[in-house]
Amino acid sequence: MEAGGSKFVCAVGTDPGDLRRETRIPTTTPAETLARAVAFFREFHDAGLAALGVATFGPVDLDPGSPTWGFITSTPKPGWMDTDMAGPFRRALSVPVAVDTDVNGAALAEHRWGAARGDDPVVFVTVGTGIGGGVLVAGRPVHGAVHPEMGHVRVPRDPGDPFPGACPYHADCLEGLASAGAMRERWGVPPEALPPEHPGWELEAHYLALGLAAVVAVLSPRRIVMGGGLTGQPRLLPRVRARLRGLLDGYPRSAVLDDLDRYLVAPALGERAGVLGALALAEDALATPRAPGG
Amino acid sequence: MEAGGSKFVCAVGTDPGDLRRETRIPTTTPAETLARAVAFFREFHDAGLAALGVATFGPVDLDPGSPTWGFITSTPKPGWMDTDMAGPFRRALSVPVAVDTDVNGAALAEHRWGAARGDDPVVFVTVGTGIGGGVLVAGRPVHGAVHPEMGHVRVPRDPGDPFPGACPYHADCLEGLASAGAMRERWGVPPEALPPEHPGWELEAHYLALGLAAVVAVLSPRRIVMGGGLTGQPRLLPRVRARLRGLLDGYPRSAVLDDLDRYLVAPALGERAGVLGALALAEDALATPRAPGG
């Protein structure tokens, strides 16, 4: 199950070529949305449903020792704070339930079946309503104090950009400057209404490259997959690559970083990365039955 | 062996309580410095020297498939570019030789014996002549396209700071704004000559907190250990914590991040973290005999 801010995508299957049933549930209240999702999966209980993966918007508590493991925590999404994303399914389905962020799930799916096969570490960045990132090291999602929240990295503001920033927590963090909402507030129209030659796209590419440069400095991933609604703008990814090349400026020296066309790529799974990430989480829950939720 | 820009620290032993011999070799030319280090370790060959760990300044090629694995790459240090840090020892000693960055080594030592025991992920940051960082996930150092180079993260400049930055590659990256050299250039005196109440320390704390906020956003480590010469300034660490608290501003919500006195800490091993990191690398080279250099 991919739990998103506007819809939940529920599917049943064994791999990307075998998703047997799929449904989309609009995200309303937690009680209603989760009840509909539980009802969908309960139909497959007798057919041998073995595990459930939940790839969710966040932030989410992923500390295995916490009494609120699997709960959404400080989300700005009304009504969803402190929602238990695992319990209702575990109680109704009696199967292992794995929970991770949507972006850690997407990283897992791209690593297993998509654009980052065999790469280590892998970062998956999504740029849309919000900006988020997932990290895999040795093929496993990374959690720590919380989990990566790459949208909230502070980047230098462009001196010519008077927009104060749209993040309710940090104003002008990366998400505050470069999410779809930030673009809409800055330019007065939704991003899809900005023509490709509008300077807003170059500014967007600049901010995203600054965020990715921070990712490279902190973690040095072997590949970065960048998806999300805004990356549908056909000239954005090449522009981000050009800006990132300028920011790295050849240091540190690296054949991998020199080849940015292969280093920074679109998701091979497209919009399927989210639900396939949930499938990958379910697979891993079966492989490690004593993991939280198992 | 801890290979530093000003000295190499060579030691022989089995754990932090058993370092039987230790010597310091000034860093001159690669040929002279490495020959003296080889001579030191060769004395222990017949006594059963089992493996060598090299924790080195960098950047260093850590790609196991690369023909220049273990070579220093694009260092600004005169004469040291393209120096093979493993080959001379492997040929002279016939033991497994592990190579990693000094900061990955220090992270390993603090994780095994120091201030980050049992924590995952762990980040070790050093602030001195340069600024660098190492990352452990599941107890193992992280490498990817290259390795973490946290000193080169771009941070927003303070609007009141006219200093252009001291990094030869990026000008005003974190290292360019906040290394000891940057402080000396900005204030005209070495950092140790700045009194504790000088505003330069508050600016320094601000920049370091911005760098650490990027680390938290990208990786969400479970603990950060911060060492290096500048952190000897007794009021710096509390100031960095206060600034970091302001930057995170409670998002994402986390009991771990709320307790910054325990989250951001000084190295328990002090200046020994470097050479003990090398010892930890040697231990791991024995445990994984087919690793590069083995």
Image: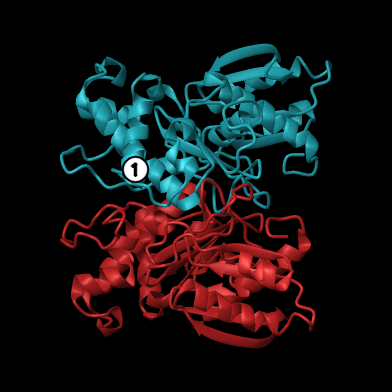
Chain colours: A red, B cyan
Vertical placement of A285 versus B273: above or below? below
Relative depth, front residue between A81 and B253: A81
Apparent side of residue A150 relative to residue A176 in the rendered image (left or right): right
Dot 1 amino acid type = Leu
Relative depth, front residue between A98 and A183: A98
Relative depth, front residue between A14 and B165: A14
User: What is the secondary structure assignment of the residue under circle 1?
Assistant: helix
Residue A60, percent from left and from top: 51, 58
Residue matched to label 1: B210
Q: At 60% across and 75% down in the image, what residue appears? A: A1
Apparent side of residue A258 relative to residue A186 in the rendered image (left or right): right
Residue A248, percent from left and from top: 39, 53
User: Disc 1 sits on a residue from what chain?
Assistant: B
How many numbered badges does the structure rendering display?
Answer: 1
Q: At 25% across and 18% down in the image, what residue appears? A: B194
Q: At 26% across and 56% down in the image, what residue appears? A: A171
Residue B59 visible somewhere in the drawing: yes
| Quadrant (top left/top right/bottom left/bottom right) for the C terminus of chain B | top right
Relative depth, front residue between B194 and A235: B194
Looking at the rendering, which quadrant does residue A127 occupy?
bottom left
Residue A112 visible somewhere in the drawing: no
| Quadrant (top left/top right/bottom left/bottom right) for the N terminus of chain B | top right
